[in-house]
Image: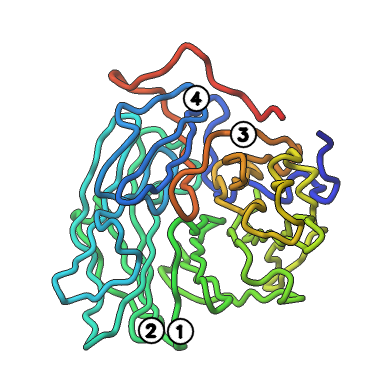
Amino acid sequence: MTPPASLAPPSSVGAGTASSPAPSSAVDSGYISNIHNSIHFVPISSFRPRHADLDDVIAIHSSPGRVLLCRRPGKGLDVFPGKGLDVFLSVWDPITDELRDLPALPLPVVPGPCTCNWDAAVICAVGEGCNHIHCGFKVVCVGTSQRRDFSCVYSPEAGSCWSDLIFAASGEHTNSFETGTCVHAGSSLYFLSRFNHEIVKYDLLTDRMSTICFRVEPDAQINGMATVLIATEDGRLGVAKTSNSTLGCSTLHLWIRDHERWEERRPIELRMLLPDDALRDPQFPPEFFPDKPWLAGFAGTRAGVIFFKTRLGYFVVDLNSGTSKNIGECLGWGCIIPYVSFCTPAPGAISTDEGPEAGLEG
């Protein structure tokens, strides 16, 4: 399969974090699907977790070696704080099978029928230069309550408790976050809001929040389709969208944020990245959209790797090389949560004798 020329130079889309692992680190990878009120871990490498399935949780984010879980399955990210519906998170290490429960999120109390919408991410506590072996973590939560944005941070090193809520200084917003869309780019976290073309930025250096508007033209062709936040190797924010024409052509659109402006890359026809059978079902007319590929996630720790949900299952695509691989059947709902660990499996973890799958072979 020929690599798409529109992605030159190769570094245009990449890992997105300043704390890249040491090249010699072992890599165990997979992804997590949310299935009803449980999660299912699907390995891509030879590593097998002790427990591939966990009940009564949903996965909302991951960072090297860790998965952030919400112990409030089936309820989404909208809550009525103060009405006995507390939100609890846990940090899971699939290799050691350690599950660390966090105290309840200190969400603002809202009156009457008002709701509070939130999202969260788990990140390395060390930051730049970390090899992600035996490092600490912290969890960042952002949300919107009564049109005001807020944030708080959990850190085991800071007394194993949540910080006080910090409200944004200005602006009124009605964000509606979606599970699995957060990306770590440079020194910031970015959270996607579904309905108002906004991206919430959380600066890890200043603990300040801000919003970035994302609108594209022509709206009728692209807006409303599947959207995934991505990141470049040099820490810039990007956006990926898919569009499907009535002629049956599926296209991947990429934008990179540079100097507070969105720069669009040349669109890529998905027939250059995916096999023909994954693009559409020949039994349906070309204008039939439900059988078309949809973006399902971005692997923030692997350069230029995007996940697609297709009629043949999930595909992982390396945008820099133009290669793709079918990695499993489509399960559950929403975005999948990619997982990568740069640790050697601990005693008790299960590995097969297949050896890790290096790279992506079409």
Which mark is drawn over residue 326? 3
Report helix, strand or loop for mark 2. Answer: strand
Kindly report the distance in space between the C-alpha atoms of the residues bearing marks 3 and 1. 39 Å
Front residue of 273/47: it is: 273
Q: Which amino acid does label 4 sit on?
A: Ala
Front residue of 291/121: it is: 291
Say above or below: 264 vs 170: above
In-image side of 274 versus 299 (left or right): right
Which of labels 1 and 4 is toward the front?
Answer: 1
Say above or below: 353 vs 217: above
x%, y% of residue 344?
Answer: 41, 23
The residue singled out by tag 1 in the image is: 173
Which mark is drawn over residue 26? 4
Q: Earlier in the sequence, mark 1 or mark 4?
A: 4
Residue at 38%, 64% (x, y): give it: 119
x%, y% of residue 284?
Answer: 71, 53
x%, y% of residue 294?
Answer: 62, 54
Which mark is drawn over residue 148? 2
x%, y% of residue 121?
Answer: 40, 56
Q: Which amino acid does label 1 sit on?
A: His
Q: Which of marks 2 and 4 is nearer the N terminus?
A: 4
Q: Which of marks 3 and 4 is nearer the N terminus?
A: 4
Kindly report the distance in space between the C-alpha atoms of the residues bearing marks 2 and 4. 43 Å
Residue at 54%, 41% (x, y): give it: 20
Labelled pair 2, 1 in contact (Cβ < 8 Å) = yes
Which of labels 3 and 4 is toward the front?
Answer: 3
Kindly report the distance in space between the C-alpha atoms of the residues bearing marks 1 and 4. 43 Å
Residue at 18%, 68% (x, y): give it: 85
